[in-house]
Amino acid sequence: LVPGDTNNVPDVFVHEYQSHVPRDATIVSNNFPASMTPGQKATVSVRVKNTGTNTWTPGTKYRLGGLGDANKFGPARVNLPAGASIGPGKEHTFTFSVTAPTSGTYTPKYRMLQEGVGWFGQTSSKKVTVARAPRDATIVSNNFPTSMIPGLTTFVSVRVKNTGTNTWKPGTNYKLGG
C-alpha cells in the first residue's frame, strides 16, 4: 500500500531492467560433454545472448574466448562468422571442435570479449572428466600380406596394446575379432 492511499488496494510497480552497458552477455547454453576419453574429438556449442547496447560484428573484434582449462581442449578464440551482426537482445551460437587432453578433471570456461578492449558478460563453464575407456586397444603392428590367394591358409600376427583401464586375463573373454 502506498502511504496516504485510501482505496486499500495494493499498488503494483513494474520495472523492466534494460542494460545500458555497451558490452554485456548472458550464457544461454553450452553442450560441452561431461566426460571424454583422451584424444577424443567433439563438436561443442556455446549459445550467447547479447544483453548490451553494442552490436557484435567480426570487424569490431567481438568473439568467444577460452579461459582456464579451455586452451587444453581447443581454440583460445572462436570468431563470429563473416557478415554476422548480433544486435542487442539477439543470440548467437558459437560452434567449434575440441580434443580432450590427457586423463584428469578439467573446467573449460568461455566468455565473450572484444579483442583489445576486454572481457565481458557471464562465463560458461562445465566440469569435464577425461578418462581412459575400460575396454580399449590399439593395433601396434601386423604382418598382413598385401594380397592373398583364395583357399590358401596364411598365418599372420597382430600386436595389440591394451589402452583401456581393464586388465586382460584368461577367462575374461577378451579376443581379437575381425
Image (cartoon, helix red, strand yellow):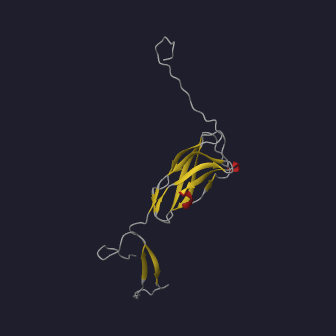
Taking the spot 62% from the left edge, 55% from the top edge, the residue there is 77
Q: Nearer the viewer, residue 104 or 16?
A: 104
Above or below, 14 against 61 in this view is above
Q: Quadrant of the C terminus?
A: bottom left
Asked whether, in this view, residue 70 is left or right of residue 23, the answer is left
In the rendered image, residue 109, in percent from the top left (x then y), is placed at: 54, 53
Residue 15 is left or right of residue 20, and the answer is left
Q: How many marks?
A: 0
Q: Which one is nearer the viewer's eye here, 74 or 80?
A: 74
**Quadrant location of residue 67?**
bottom right
State the residue at coordinates (30%, 77%): 170
Q: Residue at x 54, y 26 (%)?
A: 14
Residue 151 image point, x, y percent: 40, 87
Residue 1 at x, y = what percent? 48, 17
Q: Residue furthest left?
A: 171
Residue 155 image point, x, y percent:
40, 87
Q: Residue furthest top?
A: 6
**Residue name at image x 51 percent, y 64 percent:** 101
